[in-house]
Image (spheres, rainbow, N blue to C red):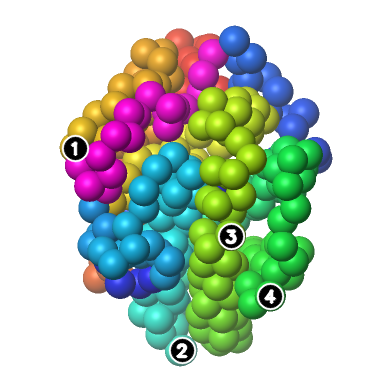
Amino acid sequence: MSASGGASSKDDISSSRRSSLSANRSPSMVLGPRLSSVKIINPTSLFVPSKLTSEVFSTENPPLDWADAGLLIPHEAIRRQMAMMVQSVNAMSDSPEDKEAWKLTLFSKWYIEYLYESVHEHHDAEEKIYFPWMITKTTIPEKEFGQSHEELMSAMAEIKQCCAEIIKKGGKGCSAQVATLKEKVPKFDVDMRAHLKEEEETVPALLRENFTQEEEGQIVEQILQAGGLGLAKKFLPAVLLAAQEWTTDAFYADFVGSIPPPIKHLVDKYFLPDFENVVMIMRDAPTLASEPKLKRVPCCGIPFCFPCLI
């Protein structure tokens, strides 16, 4: 569940990874913002439809409630990241010079470490937690136009392999890999948008008819706990930066205000600054004129520094 138009430069649970994240979980603590904390009485005071990248929701068909917003929260983040990904791939030279190898390696590391991991975890959460929960009360229609999760993840794996080859070569002599990225990334972008569109067309009505906001909130919390702080570090900043654009100040204040203080401290002091000053620069590297000096937020210096552990 959770278009190039409207994207901003401000803009990352498979069982095999669950064990590696278990040390970062805290079953008794909420690991992200809660949609239920936002009182949706007058939707026009909470959403900015003109800033949405959705092909379903717009000024003519604005989101109305928690069922719509619940999908838009992850989907808007994913679409904005994809828009910038396509922009970076389009900026790559067909015959990249060795002196600009850093552009390819930084982008490739961003894709593997952030976008691939975030989207993969998102789809796994849907397949293993969210959709099984939904079919306890309703039937989810077969997909008609959008690619299946398996097909999308296969496409992402091919792009990941290409990026891994670029990293192995140090970004040098990568004309073939660039050609592959220019072929596969735009197609993946189109297919992924169609997939998200289909979910936004079908899922909200099923939620309203069969579940309460409280029930949906509980299953989302399960997803957050399964992803742990590792996923929160990679994907929550993208969610929050996107929400700054498509939601009003009132919505955003309530949404962010629902994050528990210990997690919000990590978000404010580490996750968001690193995302804006390191992660986004890695993503946008092919569009930059000179090699950046990436510097993460320094930790407190003790051996068991919590941000460093995740």
Choose mark 1 or mark 3, whichever is in front.
3
Choose mark 2 or mark 4, whichever is in front.
4
Q: Which dot marks residue 202?
A: 3
Classify mark 3: helix, strand or loop. Answer: helix
Q: Which dot marks residue 249?
A: 1
Residue 110: percent from the left, percent from the top? 49, 55
Classify mark 2: helix, strand or loop. Answer: loop
Q: Which residues are magenta?
A: 29-47
For marks 1 and 3, give the CA distance: 28 Å
Q: Which residue: 34% across, 29% down?
A: 38
Above or below — where is 309 with respect to 219?
above
Classify mark 1: helix, strand or loop. Answer: helix
Kindly check if marks 1 and 4 are in contact, taking CB atoms under 8 A apart as contact: no
As shown in the figure, which amino acid type bears the numbered disc 4? Glu
Q: Which residue: 29% across, 34% down?
A: 41
Q: Quadrant of residue 163?
A: bottom right
**Sequence-first disc among 3 and 2:** 2
Residue 310: percent from the left, percent from the top? 55, 27
Residue 119: percent from the left, percent from the top? 59, 53
Side of 47 relative to 4 (left or right): left
As shown in the figure, which amino acid type bears the numbered disc 3? Thr
For marks 1 and 2, give the CA distance: 45 Å
Q: Which residue is mark 4?
A: 144
Side of 214 relative to 296 (left or right): right
Choose mark 1 or mark 2, whichever is in front.
1
Side of 243 relative to 165 (left or right): left
Q: Which residue is mark 2?
A: 95
For marks 4 and 3, give the CA distance: 11 Å
Please tell me which residue lies in front, 3 or 301. 3
**Sequence-first disc among 1 and 3:** 3
Please tell me which residue lies in front, 58 or 82. 58
